[in-house]
Image (spheres, rainbow, N blue to C red):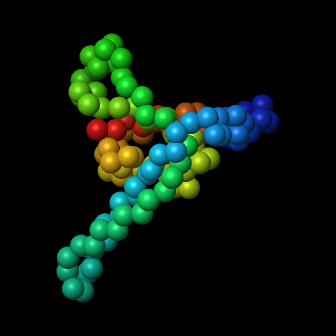
Amino acid sequence: MKPFGVDIKSIVGEALKGNLDTLTYTAIETTYDPIGGGQTTTETDYTFDGIIDSYSAYEMQSSLIEGGDKPVTVIADSLPVTPKQGDRIEGYKIINIDPDPSGATYEIQVR
């Protein structure tokens, strides 16, 4: 999306490049074998630019945020896959994903 003809996603990605942590995203795919039965789980790791933060006491009052949950900001251009619930970031399970309207970042809740 290019509001006002400006590629905000690329501008944010370039401005923050090298200024954040390099984190690991683990995509988890489970496939079912219809002939032999059973499931196979494949994990694929990707590195990306982002930051793991902490929720404030005010945010923790929400019934959707549990103790130990963390917010992760992901620079969208640095992650080659679209985040999905159940995948992992630095070993934490993805609970909720909130892309910003420009598509430049994802705010992800992990547990």
Q: Give the image location of residue 74, x and y in percent.
A: 51, 40
**Front residue of this view, candidates 35 and 17:** 17
Residue 111 horizontal side relative to residue 99, left or right: left
Is residue 84 among what the camera can see?
yes
Q: Give the image location of residue 48, x and y in percent.
A: 53, 48
Q: Give the image location of residue 56, x and y in percent.
A: 36, 17
The residue at 52%/39% (across/down) is: 21
Q: Residue furthest top?
A: 58
Q: Residue furthest bottom?
A: 35
The residue at 34%/38% (across/down) is: 110
The image quadrant where one finds the C terminus is: top left
The residue at 35%/32% (across/down) is: 70
The residue at 38%/46% (across/down) is: 90
Q: Give the image location of residue 36, x and y in percent.
A: 21, 85
Q: Residue furthest left?
A: 37
**Front residue of this view, candidates 66 and 103:** 66
Residue 103 image-quadrant placement: top right
Residue 10 image-quadrant placement: top right
Whether residue 94 is situated above or below residue 70 in the rendered picture: below
